[in-house]
Image: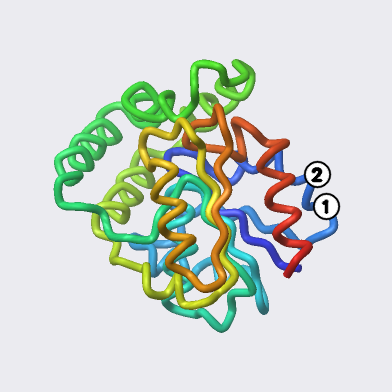
């Protein structure tokens, strides 16, 4: 099975290191999205070029927005869709000032600035310090120009709810302590699909695949086994 693991902002494909052993029986792709264009549609098309045939798109946060774009542009290519700490709707207008603030931080301070402003809060206080340190390391290595393109894409993304809830097998995973995208968003999105399921991981923040990899991997592999 082809599986595309699509990373969150301001990380890259290395955030999926904890998933690779669990997915060893599959053809796994971990593209870095920033270089694929300036919008989620361009990123989606770039992923589709890299991954042949049908695929399962697994997206964390921003990577989930890319997976949603694949559902809009090429639903026939999707075997299933997994969103983790993500959602399908457009960015609400009231978030625009925050996006502009993040763009300024990325331009002036790069990944390290975004870590301090936002990304370190993706984890709960109980998260493994080694996991948090690894995320910090990855974030600090990102190119500011790519981060700016990503934030602009998040700000300008269209609503993909109709495509995501059209009947494609859908798994939505949420951290119970995710303050960016509450678990109720995951439950509502899954309930809106005739083929959707929500899983909430207790004691977990915005990045279940990193913070609680054992639980996330168990949920993900069980879902894949049922396809």
Q: Which residue carries the number 2 mark? A: 21
Residue 115: image quadrant is top left
User: Could you tell me if the residues under marks 2 and 1 are in contact, i.e. CB atoms within 8 Å?
Assistant: yes
Q: CA distance from mark 2 to mark 1?
A: 5 Å
**Horizontal and vertical percent for residue 195?**
56, 71
Q: Give the secondary structure at mark 1.
A: loop
Q: Give the secondary structure at mark 2.
A: loop
Nearer to the camera, 50 or 25: 25
Callout 1 crowding tier (Cα within 10 Å): few <14, some 14–19, many ≥20: few
Which residue is drawn at the image coordinates 38% and 47% (left, top)? Answer: 146
Residue 1: image quadrant is bottom right
Quadrant where the C terminus sits is: bottom right
Which label sits on residue 24? 1
Q: Residue furthest right?
A: 25
Nearer to the camera, 101 or 179: 179
Check the image and report above or below for 116 versus 165. above
Q: Is residue 67 left or right of residue 185?
A: right
**Horizontal and vertical percent for residue 170?**
56, 65
């Amino acid at each position: 099975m082809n599986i595309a693991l699509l990373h969150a902002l301001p990380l890259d494909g290395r955030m999926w290191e904890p998933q690779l052993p669990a997915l060893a029986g599959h053809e796994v792709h971990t593209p870095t999205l920033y270089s694929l264009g300036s919008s989620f549609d361009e990123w989606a098309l770039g992923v589709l070029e890299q991954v042949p045939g049908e695929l399962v798109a697994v997206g964390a946060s921003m990577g989930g927005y890319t997976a949603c774009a694949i559902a809009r542009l090429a639903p026939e290519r999707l075997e299933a869709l997994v969103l983790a700490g993500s959602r399908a709707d457009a960015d609400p207008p009231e978030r625009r000032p925050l996006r502009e603030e993040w763009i300024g931080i990325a331009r002036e301070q790069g990944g390290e600035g975004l870590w301090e402003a936002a990304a370190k809060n993706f984890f709960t206080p109980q998260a493994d310090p080694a996991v948090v340190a690894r995320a910090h390391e990855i974030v600090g290595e990102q190119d500011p120009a790519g981060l700016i393109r990503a934030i602009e894409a998040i700000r300008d993304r269209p609503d993909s709810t109709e495509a995501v809830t059209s009947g494609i097998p859908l798994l939505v995973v949420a951290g119970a302590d995710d303050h960016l995208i509450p678990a109720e968003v995951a439950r509502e999105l899954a309930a809106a699909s005739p083929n959707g399921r929500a899983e909430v991981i207790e004691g977990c923040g915005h990045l279940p695949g990193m913070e609680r990899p054992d639980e996330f991997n168990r949920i993900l592999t069980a879902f894949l086994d049922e396809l």
